[in-house]
Image: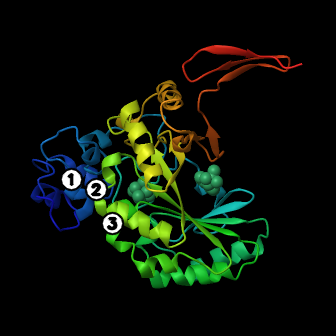
Amino acid sequence: MGGIVHIKTTKALVAAGLVADAAGLDAVAAKYAIGITPAISALIDRDDPTDPIARQFVPTTAELKTTADERVDPIGDLAHSPVEGIVHRYPDRVLLKAVHVCPVYCRFCFRREMVGPQGLGTLTPSELDAAIAYIAAHSEIWEVILTGGDPLVLSPRRLREIMVRLADIAHVMIVRFHTRVPVVEPDRVDAAMIEALKASGKTTYLAVHANHPREFSDSARAAVARLVDGGVVLVSQSVLLKGVNDDVETLASLMKTFVENRIKPYYLHHPDLAPGTSHFRMSIAEGQALVRALRGRISGLAQPTYILDIPGGHGKADIGASTITGGDGCFTVRDWQGIEHSYAPD
Ligand SMILES: *Cc1c(COP(=O)(O)O)cnc(C)c1O
Ligand code: SF4
């Protein structure tokens, strides 16, 4: 029942055995795009109504419920966009959003109002020219982060065009991609794609978005290995999601899976206040307790930073529970078992 079709409609969801009937889901589909790749469809256990993969990708009527604190632009991209496709919030790095399409549409997506067939689309050639010109004109930009949407939906030819232009900008040293493709469409990551991700004189980083260890199928692992062997440095990006990875077993296993696959855990995001996503959110106190439980339980190599993107465009904050209180002269430090120790150097 894994199927070979790319699911994009409620009818296709029914045909793939992922929902019993489409009733009620057409209203969801009218607001938010649906996308499930064959690789992801094959991972879903149809007999488990709480399957953590299904929960991330199969739409539900819970998405029709919005809460007062949710926002169309939860992390304030639009407030920091000097030209179409660029978000410049921190001095030394910019987001370059060339495309607002993804191979899958995650039900918790923080940019769900901007992505999909009805979203912001792909930059036109002249918009892309203006975005590259902006980067070239701002010598403080050390890093360009290609995100979207998912930049790896672009063909190797299109990616290479962008990389060649970035290679010409002397002050840009790092190009980072944020993508779900290695996990959701692993066969796309072929030799031509990997070559296209690299630019002469620049270092390429790629943040792999995955939220559950079961996303690492054999083909996903192979795609990740091709990237690392091809000279791309990999870091992880996950979202803490109720019903997907909100227990210490799953989180520990996810982080260890990253490390085993040569992906350095980077960020664990608290879910953003995107419309119709309240069923995915837990409290920050619950998130802090989970992150604290990881410390000591798994290797330091496997520890992510717990991050909140402050609503309104104020950037990211590290919200892992602080383990130190007090001030110069006398600090109290809490160890991984919760025991407090004083630290009072002369
Ligand atoms: C998240 C984000 C970045 C990247 O932040 P890092 O902490 O470097 O990963 C850069 N610019 C914007 C606008 C962002 O939202
Ligand atoms: S892949 Fe990223 S941008 Fe695309 S729907 Fe999922 S979370 Fe949103």
Can residue 42 be seen here?
A: yes
Residue 72 vs residue 50, the one in the foreground: 50
Q: Spatial distance from mark 2 to mark 1, Cα to Cα?
A: 6 Å
**Which quadrant of the rendered structure holds the C terminus?**
top right
Give the label, 1 or 3, closer to the camera.
3
- Residue identifier under label 1: 26
Q: In terms of secondary structure, where does tag 1 sit? A: helix
Q: Within 10 Å of the Cα at label 2, are there few (<14), some (14-19), or many (20+) other Cα atoms?
A: few
Q: Position of residue 203 (x, y in %)?
A: 64, 70
Quadrant in the picture for residue 81: bottom right
The disc, 1 or 3, on the residue closer to the chain's N-terminal end is 1
Residue 74 vs residue 160, the one in the foreground: 160
Q: In terms of secondary structure, where does tag 2 sit? A: helix
Q: Decide if residue 256 is on the left or right side of residue 39.
A: right
Residue at the right extreme, as displayed:
346
Residue 237 vs residue 257, the one in the foreground: 257
- Residue identifier under label 2: 30
Q: Position of residue 255 (x, y in %)?
A: 45, 44
The disc, 3 or 2, on the residue closer to the chain's N-terminal end is 2
Q: Amino acid at mark 2?
A: Ala
Q: Amino acid at mark 1?
A: Asp
- State the mark number for residue 185: 3
Q: Spatial distance from mark 1 to mark 3, Cα to Cα?
A: 26 Å
